Image (cartoon, rainbow, N blue to C red):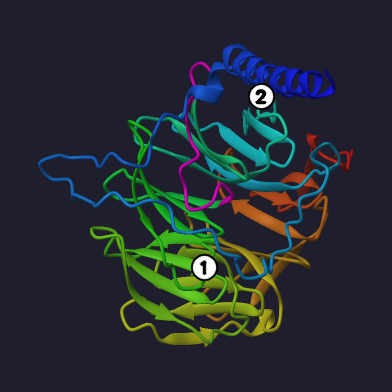
Amino acid sequence: MRYRIQITLFLSSILLGIGISGWKAFANPMIEAPSPLAQTPIRGDQTPLYDSQPPPPRVDPLPNQRRLEDTLIEQDYRVTALQQDYTNNLWIGAWQGLARIDPNTGRTLARISLPNTIIGGLAQDRMGRLWVGTYQGLKRVDPRSNEITAQNFSLPSNRVLSLLIDRRGYLWVGTDRGLALISPDQGLLMTTLQELPGVSAQAMTLDAEGQLWVGTLDGLVRVNTASALPMEQLRNLPGRTVQSLTLGPDDLLWVGTSGGLLVIDPETGEVLRSVTPFREQSVTAVRFDPSGNLWVGTRSGLFLVNRYNGAVLREIPGLPSSRVLDILPNVGNKVWVGTTEGLAWVSLTTGDAQSHQAFSRTPPTP
């Protein structure tokens, strides 16, 4: 009798588990949205054909030098990604979620429900759809309905750190275990770079030839966008870990590392100079505005820099935090700044900084 009772309880627990799982799938259809995504290459007359590759085996990545620890999201105000859309509105990716605001007035236009989601990167494709890289995978948002229309969890890792749309309109996804190439229309995984030197794709940009440069935990890697294969690696950079990367008006790479700001010739791979005021500083964001002015974010503040001689023209006071995570210049005649304590903007007219009340721990100055 005792054995019959134990067997009955065991079978009941199995049936109960199946019932709960089935109910969850029924109640939340988005769970079933990511159908097999990793096995379908995209074909076309002028589209390169990739061999569909499964994600690489899960290996322990190198330590993340940016130290973006997984803390309680509801208590964390850091803003890690900023993206202007085709309507000139501003999307804000934060550890509190995703939102769209009017950059002229600061008014919140929409908030997208992404519960318990940390955002690592944003990008907009040619059709105007917003791609959101999170620490739980990749999501596509329709800005017209503010709804999630696709998800992808078949990545080398679901911890997405960077996103980039290349010249063909394909989406590159940088994770802490390598790269993935996505077709934006179907949301399908085309291929993965299984053995990315430096392991973690922290930052990405395109050079003048349209090739992809990836900032990693161990320098820079140039990737052929037609074959998705590494072309070269630049190691032994000052600071080693690349945290930000952009192509300047001079077609040179400006590279922010955990130990400085470097200028690199993408054709030769030569480090042309280390910008003196930022030596041995952790440079977390590097961006140019349309006038060619250089904005540099660090763990100790935001700076306007003369790109010709590296001189600091101005240090920007009044930010919610001195630890800058992202910069987006010239949206609504402002430079938008994401920090560890929230969102701020710098007026291009007055040069003054002010916190955004809705996305900052620090209230705006009167």
**Magenta stretch bounds:** 142-160
93 and 160: which is toward the camera: 160
Q: Is residue 186 above or below residue 303?
A: above
60 and 193: which is toward the camera: 60
Q: Which residue: 76% across, 47% down?
A: 78
- In the figure, is residue 27 to the left or right of 322? left
The three-letter code of the residue at mark 2 reads: Ser
- Looking at the image, the residue that sits furthest to the left is 45
**x then y, percent, for residue 361:** 87, 41
Specify whether residue 228 is painted magenta.
Answer: no
Q: Mark 1 Cα within 10 Å, few/some/many (few <14, many 20+)?
A: many
Per the image, the residue denoted by label 1 is 199
366 and 298: which is toward the camera: 298
The three-letter code of the residue at mark 1 reads: Val
Secondary structure beneath disc 1?
Answer: loop
Q: Is residue 213 above or below residue 169?
A: below
Can residue 346 be seen?
no
Q: Which residue: 28% across, 39% down?
A: 40
Q: Which residue: 51% across, 77% down?
A: 219
Q: Nearer the N terminus, badge 2 or badge 1?
A: 2
Q: Is residue 197 above or below residue 108?
A: below
125 and 311: which is toward the camera: 125
Per the image, the residue denoted by label 2 is 113
Report the quarter where the C terminus lies.
top right
**x then y, percent, for residue 49:** 18, 49
C-alpha span from label 2 to label 1? 31 Å
